[in-house]
Image: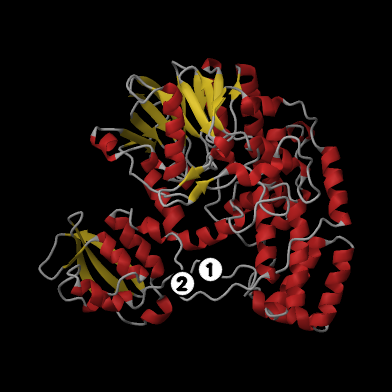
Amino acid sequence: MTQPKDATGATRTAQAALAAALPPEDGADMARARRGFIDTAPNARVETARGGVAWDLATFAFQADDEVCPDTVNPSLWRQAQLNLNHGLFQVTEGIYQVRGFDLSNITFVEGDEGFIVIDPLTSSEPAAAALALMRKHRGDKPVSAVIYTHSHVDHYGGIKGVLSDADIAAGARIVAPEGFLAEAVSENVLAGNAMSRRATYMYGALLPRGPRGHVDSGLGKAVSSGQVSLIAPTESISKTGTRLTLDGVEIVFQVTPGTEAPAEMNFFFPRHRALCMAENCTCQLHNLYTPRGAQVRDAKAWSFYIDEAIDLFAKDSDVLFASHHWPRWGQEDQVAFLETQSDLYKFIHDQTLRMANHGLTPLEIAERMALPPSLAAEWHTRGYYGTLSHNTKAVYQRYLGWFDGNPANLHKHPPVEAGQRYVDLAGGGEALLAKARAAFEAGDYRWVAELANHLVFAEPDNMEARDLQADALEQMGYQAESAPWRDFYLTGAQELRHVRPAPTAPRQGAAGQLRTLPADQLLDSLSVRLNGETIGRAEPAMTLTFTDVAESFRLKVRNGVLHHRAVRSTADAIPLTRGTLVDLVTGERTLEAARADGLVSGDTAALEALLGVLDRFDFWFEIVLP
């Protein structure tokens, strides 16, 4: 098995040049990251009920404070990785606590009159339960009286069943979220869930070993936990800025911020505590306007506006600012400076991208020219540990002008395999192209090597010389990357190029688990993207389904290769089944014949059988760096 390689001379030179250009280190961020520390678990280790490991920071021990940055890690990313290694229970201010370093995100606890208000219960249940146990150890064995989801990303709701029991729910625990939360959570994690989940293995380095030549950090935090993901629908939605709620005796003032870091997101202020929660709208880095795992492009202009609005609404009354990632800021002066700089960061990228676009520059040209002004570049929290200037400028361009750069030569380009074959022929064959790529590698021009070798890989996917050379180039680009997702994308690509993955015996279907949590209407909506328009032809199966677990009925009909559904009253010819049974049938976990034999489906199921026959099953392990 090919092992990761050393940093080349060109990479070592690039690392040294970057280190010399970084802002001066004053130790302020490390002091903030450690302020208020109370206690933690050894290595924040969390096991699952079956003896597996949902979270363990021991794998990041190579980043200890006294360890020097290796040549294979960007020195700026190394600094962020060491900051993110701080973990445990921290006091933010009187009555507000955070557990940090138990997942990619933070979980926050606010002490109410009777129990704890939980803000953002992490990605999975086991780390969330461990964080709650740590809080109870030091602040009393109190119930969870309410949960607040700041926004619709899974690392901010997936662990809810680790903090809310069935008894808590029965007792009336309130769950508050921004308006549109459930629809956006479904859209992002289900409709495009298979593709997004596969790409997320690249973005978060899920397949990489942890170490100086593998995954070192995710920018937002160390990594994503691997416990049980869950979702409980909100009981209350916030639709208007200025809305005030009292949860367990604690007054909260909300600010809705749609279209910012998530389509459904909100900030909020605690008047009694003089504390401002900025959700994920202000973190200690440049965030994504477009996330490489895939998602809707975010609105940089709106993002900047809502940060400015938060300053106007809350800053004069706030003594501490905290967020769903990273560490807080204390004192009005520090908070306002931080918020203003973050606001200007997103507005600068927005305005300068459109300025250059209006001069006729293309997305690639703008990304190559974009640079922050000295005042913004002087701050650590504007650096691209997660988002980058390069792909964020392309996101702004896409939001306004779409994927097409206006050059007609790019309007109908050949797809990768066909283009690769033509480029190889143009170069005079595979060996000639490889010779040019090897020379570029020796010159340290890794971006060009990756592009050249990629054409040969897509033309000749079994050409291991081409794959190995492209992997070598991607690896060096990963070592140099300041952005953790870029590093993980490059290194995961290198790994998959070097190692042939055995063909799976059956497709593994990404995001299939979340289908089971969907309301009936949204479950049926998710089926429409599985309908194979190439095979359905002129067939138009139609049926009525009655979901016996929720007492809802829907009429389904295929027309012009499109699956339609609408709510109806149950009819005599309706097919009764549960939502779970339908998910089993769609994903292939149960056959229709077996479901009928087990009494899970009855009636005339011919139309259902016809529909199931034209629904695709997505394979999680689709290729990315290979055709």
Say few, some or many: other residues with alpha carbon within 10 Å of mark 1 (under 14 / 14 to 19 / 20 or more): some
- Percent from the top left, x then y, of residue 110? 43, 25
Amino acid bearing label 2: Pro
Q: Who's the residue at 46% across and 59% down the image?
A: 193
Contact, CB < 8 Å: mark 1 with mark 2? yes
- Percent from the top left, x then y, of residue 56? 56, 44
* Residue 317 is at least partly visible in this image: yes
Task: Quadrant for residue 203, please give it.
Answer: bottom right
> SS for tag 1?
loop
Looking at the image, which is closer to me, 222 or 154?
A: 222
Amino acid bearing label 1: Trp
* Residue 264 is at least partly visible in this image: no
* Mark 1 → mark 2, Cα distance in angstroms: 8 Å
Task: Quadrant for residue 26, please give it.
Answer: top right
- Percent from the top left, x then y, of residue 31? 67, 24
Residue assigned mark 2: 507
Numbered badge on residue 621? 1
Q: Relative to 25, is 495 above or below?
A: below
Q: In which quarter of the image is the N terminus?
A: bottom right
**Lateral position of residue 277 relative to residue 208, left or right:** left
